[in-house]
Image: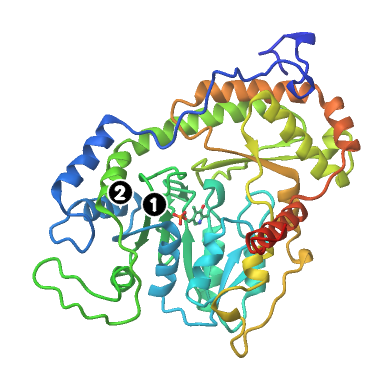
């Protein structure tokens, strides 16, 4: 099973003083990759003297918008200044009102749930499917109330969610579906590109994402002419800027200033030319890693149902304590031990999210907006309860993630050394199990909650406190 590496007794775990499986000199390649062509694109934009959507004759932003609409398969794309704003504007275009409820997954990046809140809408959290890490459609349906207006569906880590089931539920209940595709650029679900399946959908171009800009950016995609117009106005104080002729400077409704920068559009346009090739190469590199670790007992790798593709933004692995001769209580300690052993070998393994989103202080303490929207009459309180999110908690406890290391198209050799490291750690399963059984363990979310309270107390402690 582990024929590729036959070092016998030389395979002492790095955690216990042995040599590393991943050589120290083999570094994670920087992401996003910046080529000569990217630099030229930004310089061209700089030389144009036109820097935002309000600069008459600016071509980079509309150029990126039409290229991305074509890539995704929608009639419209609207660029904004970040992915969080993209979600808020998508919800704003749908006409959400204060106190409206928006269903969001309990496992995601904070932005998914902060965006509705920025409109004074109430994020209502639902549990995930522990195999796809995406919204569980049954949990979505169970969370619907007469106040529900929309569902923000996240394609977590790059795997498309159960869109047909969720769209069907939404249709039955008259809800709008927004895809948060910040982690899933280019992924396909039943032959359709993500970002073309919900009513109005969003992407992030943050430097950490699979399609990046040189800083912050976001994209909104939709087939609906009216939603596209509203989103365009929302990024510009509710104003309509004509393609030609004089501006009216009329704010028709409450908007924000979420205009993107032309330099950032130029950079991403240049990145987009390489994007399909890079995505294909990434897919090969990741699959080669997954093929090698597939035989390891008790290592559950990301699942990709046959009807969709995975953008591989993040690789999340779960561990099954039974395969290590441990009972379920040791899922967390086992994950912590495996993660520590892999890190010592040189694998950039780390948790992604330390707690369910609803456990974040922002949603529990409700600091900001004077406690609204929860303070509005008729808005249910819904305090956070661990028992509402068993799958999210279980996945946080028993899984770790690889981020960034695999994004560069030339990450293949590094990922092969990662495979060596997994095999080496798995050869020492007994040792790992012994460790896991005897270590003191506090769940991530409890550690994080304690750390958060200390951080808050220290940030606002009197300066002469001690
Ligand atoms: C990154 C991310 C966002 C937000 O994007 P920003 O551009 O960082 O504001 C939203 N949702 C998910 C799932 C993300 O990963």
Instruction: Give percent across and percent down for residue 335.
Output: 76, 39
**Any atom of ligand 1 within 8 Å of the CB at mark 1?**
yes
Give whichever of 314, 266 is nearer the camera. 266
Locate the C terminus by quadrant: bottom right
Dot 2 corresponds to which residue? 264
Q: Residue at x 56, y 65 (%)?
A: 113
Instruction: Give percent across and percent down for residue 50.
Output: 17, 54
305 is higher (above) or lower (below) than 427: below
Give whichever of 368, 463 is nearer the camera. 463
Locate the N terminus by quadrant: top right
Instruction: Give percent across and percent down for residue 382.
Output: 70, 76
Instruction: Give percent across and percent down for residue 294.
Output: 67, 29
92 is higher (above) or lower (below) than 261: below
Q: How is the image coloured?
A: rainbow
Secondary structure beneath label 2 = helix
Distance between the alpha carbons at the discs numbered 2 and 1: 8 Å
Residue 307 visible within the image: no
Q: Are marks 2 and 1 in contact (CB under 8 Å)?
A: yes
Q: Residue at x 36, y 46 (%)?
A: 213
Give whichever of 71, 348 is nearer the camera. 348
337 is higher (above) or lower (below) than 170: above
Q: Residue at x 14, y 66 (%)?
A: 243
- CA neighbours of label 2 inside 10 A, class few (<14), some (14 to 19), many (20+): many
Residue 450 visible within the image: yes
Secondary structure beneath label 1 = loop
**Any atom of ligand 1 within 8 Å of the CB at mark 2?**
no
Q: Residue at x 68, y 51 (%)?
A: 354
Dot 1 corresponds to which residue? 216
């Amino acid at each position: 099973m582990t024929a590729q590496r036959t070092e016998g007794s030389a395979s002492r775990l790095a955690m216990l003083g042995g040599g590393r499986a991943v050589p120290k000199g083999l570094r994670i390649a920087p992401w996003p990759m910046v080529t000569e062509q990217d630099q030229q694109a930004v310089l061209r934009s700089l030389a144009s003297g036109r820097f935002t959507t309000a600069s008459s004759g600016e071509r980079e932003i509309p150029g990126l918008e039409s290229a991305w609409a074509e890539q995704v398969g929608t009639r419209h794309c609207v660029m904004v200044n970040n992915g969080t704003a993209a979600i808020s504007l998508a919800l704003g275009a749908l006409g959400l009102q204060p106190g409206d409820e928006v269903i969001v997954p309990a496992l995601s990046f904070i932005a998914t749930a902060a965006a509705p809140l920025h409109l004074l809408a109430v994020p209502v959290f639902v549990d995930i499917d522990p195999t796809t890490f995406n919204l569980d459609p049954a949990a979505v349906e169970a969370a619907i109330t007469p106040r529900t207006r929309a569902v923000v569906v996240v394609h977590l880590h790059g795997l498309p969610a159960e869109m047909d089931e969720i769209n069907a539920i939404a249709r039955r209940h008259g809800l709008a579906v927004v895809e948060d595709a910040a982690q899933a650029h280019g992924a396909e679900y039943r032959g359709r590109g993500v970002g073309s399946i919900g009513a109005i959908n969003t992407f992030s171009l943050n430097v950490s994402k699979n399609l990046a800009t040189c800083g912050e950016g976001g994209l909104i995609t939709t087939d609906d002419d009216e939603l596209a117009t509203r989103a365009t106005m929302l990024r510009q104080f509710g104003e309509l800027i004509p393609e030609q002729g004089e501006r009216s400077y009329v704010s028709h409704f409450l908007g924000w200033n979420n205009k993107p920068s032309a330099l950032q559009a130029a950079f991403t346009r240049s990145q987009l030319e390489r994007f399909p090739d890079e995505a294909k190469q990434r897919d090969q590199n990741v699959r080669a890693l997954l093929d090698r670790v597939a035989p390891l007992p008790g290592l559950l790798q990301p699942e990709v149902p046959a009807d969709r593709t995975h953008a591989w933004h993040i690789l999340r692995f779960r561990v099954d304590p039974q395969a290590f001769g441990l009972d379920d209580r040791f899922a967390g300690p086992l994950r912590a031990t495996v993660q520590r052993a892999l890190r010592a070998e040189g694998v950039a393994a780390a948790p992604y999210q330390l707690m369910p989103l609803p456990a974040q202080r922002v949603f529990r303490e409700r600091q900001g907006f004077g406690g609204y929207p929860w303070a509005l009459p008729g808005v249910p309180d819904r305090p956070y309860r661990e028992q509402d999110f068993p799958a999210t908690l279980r996945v946080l406890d028993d899984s770790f993630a690889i981020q960034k290391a695999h994004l560069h198209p030339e990450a293949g050799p590094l990922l092969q050394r990662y495979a060596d490291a997994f095999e080496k750690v798995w050869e020492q399963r007994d040792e790992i199990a012994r460790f896991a059984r005897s270590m003191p363990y506090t769940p991530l979310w409890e550690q994080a909650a304690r750390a958060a309270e200390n951080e808050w107390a220290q940030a606002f402690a009197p300066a002469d406190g001690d």
